[in-house]
Amino acid sequence: MLKAKGIVKQVGPKTILQGINLEIRAGECVAILGPNGAGKSTLLKILATLMKPSAGIVYLDGKDAWKSPEQVRGNIGLISHQSLLYDNLTARENLLFYGKMLGLNDLDQRVSQLLKEVGLLLSANEQVRNFSRGMQQRLALARAILHNPPLLFLDEPFTGLDQQGIGLLNNLIGQAKTKGTTLIMVTHSFEEGLAFSDRVLVLNKGGLVYTGETKELTITGLRDLYCEKTGVKTS
Amino acid sequence: MSYYNQIRVLVWKDLASEFRSKEMLNSMLIFALLTTVIFSFAFDPEADTVKKVFPGVIWVALCFAGILGLNRSFQGEKSNDCFMGLLLCTPDPGVVYLGKLFSNLIFMLIIELISLPILFLLFDYRLQGSLGWLVLVIALGTWGFIAIGTFLSALAMNTKNSELLLPVILFPLLIPLLIAAVKATGLILGGGDFASWSNWLGIICSFDLIFTVVSWFLFDYVLEV
């Protein structure tokens, strides 16, 4: 599904990623852990074709992501700690805008269905600027899955979610796994990492220092391993 | 989705968003009107000097009001990281450039439609040439200004002092366009025939073509900065 070969990202004199190689199978759920500044979000952006690597290639379904972005980007969904929503547009307008840009059919029906699923149907015609943080994040979930992407990136997705949002995100991840969606999640939380993923990757100082199956790990084991690989003590 | 439809949707989004908040339009309009009023106080409407400075006054008012708009052009995309969402929807960032170009052009034309008649009134200026040619020159000059301005506002989007940086990098590049636009405007206002200002029109058209195409092609690289 997704393969990265020798990913290097350099910004000025600083090397953010140094030769990352990884392969993620279709339907696999992978959690990326690492301390601040390890390069997690940069790696996620490169894998999602939002940032060009200084060197290396990203293959999505066997295609070079930067040579054929038109075949790749429509298959990607992104849930970030930012909502990626326009404050001056209403909830419905935001979803319609993204849906039209993606060229989706039966958009009105799909938008109404998603607004209902995330509990925002009654607020559909309100501007997003008037939404609480939790409501914005719920709408962001709807935006991310609007086109049923087979590949979903989650960048610290639980940040800022209210209880209803956490429940929705848990459901969404569960449904996505059932559907065979490939999930790649950047997180600081060991609990989330272990609960939702089949495999854990640990990044430190721009390098991939650990990769392992979650079924072989416990929370304590993961904490010890993280501490050993990154030198960062966790409570 | 086709290239054209993506541009159309992007323009719709910008217009819907701006007409709801009117943040950009209000600031541009107020600035353009203030500049107009201050210039009208500064120059005696009956003096001959008005005829000489009037074309320059028009373009100074439009450019400074335009800069305010351009500075805000990508702010909406920057908040909530909307730009990332936008890039995920389109395989070609050139769509974003063209969409923004058309949106900014519409905003600028709205400001011109309101402020230029007021400028003529305050200066008590009587047009001696053709109104159609004047409109054409102003529209083409505005296109060139917006074409390069939209490109550079994307470049300045992620910098700390973008509001300062944009005019600093934009105005030197605008010099040929502004000279040609001011000269052509002056000659048309004074009733000059087509032959007398056609060369200036040629420069404006060349500028528009070159900077639109170059900006469109290079937009992908700007996003990497």
Image (cartoon, coloured by chain):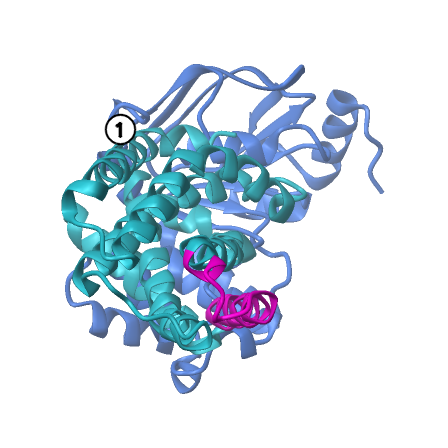
Chain colours: A blue, B cyan
Q: Give coordinates of residue B181: x percent, y percent.
A: 34, 46
Tell me: residue A25, above or below residue A5.
below
Q: Give coordinates of residue A226: x percent, y percent.
A: 73, 29
Judging depth in this view, the residue of B162 and A138 nearest the camera is: B162
Mark 1: few, some, or many residues within 10 Å (few <14, many ≥20)?
some
Please say whether residue B219 is one of the residues in the magenta stretch. no
Q: Name the residue tied to disc 1.
A: A61
Q: Is residue B94 left or right of residue B108?
A: left
State whether residue A84 appears in this view: no
The residue positioned 51% from the left and 72% from the top of the image is B33
Element type at mark 1: loop
State whether residue A42 appears in this view: yes
Judging depth in this view, the residue of B3 and B169 nearest the camera is: B169
Q: In which quarter of the image is residue B175?
A: top left
Q: Which amino acid does label 1 sit on?
A: Asp
Q: In this view, does A45 lie to the left or right of B105?
A: right
- Count the numbered circles shown: 1
Residue occupying the far bottom of the picture: A122
Q: Main secondary structure of the magenta part?
A: helix
The residue positioned 41% from the left and 45% from the top of the image is B150
- Give the magenta-colored segment's residue range: B23-51
The residue positioned 53% from the left and 51% from the top of the image is A80
Judging depth in this view, the residue of A16 and B113 nearest the camera is: B113
Q: Is residue A24 left or right of residue A109?
A: right
Q: Give coordinates of residue B43: x percent, y percent.
A: 56, 65
Provide the chain ID for the residue under circle 1. A
Q: In which quarter of the image is residue A159?
A: bottom right
Q: Give coordinates of residue B115: x percent, y percent.
A: 41, 71
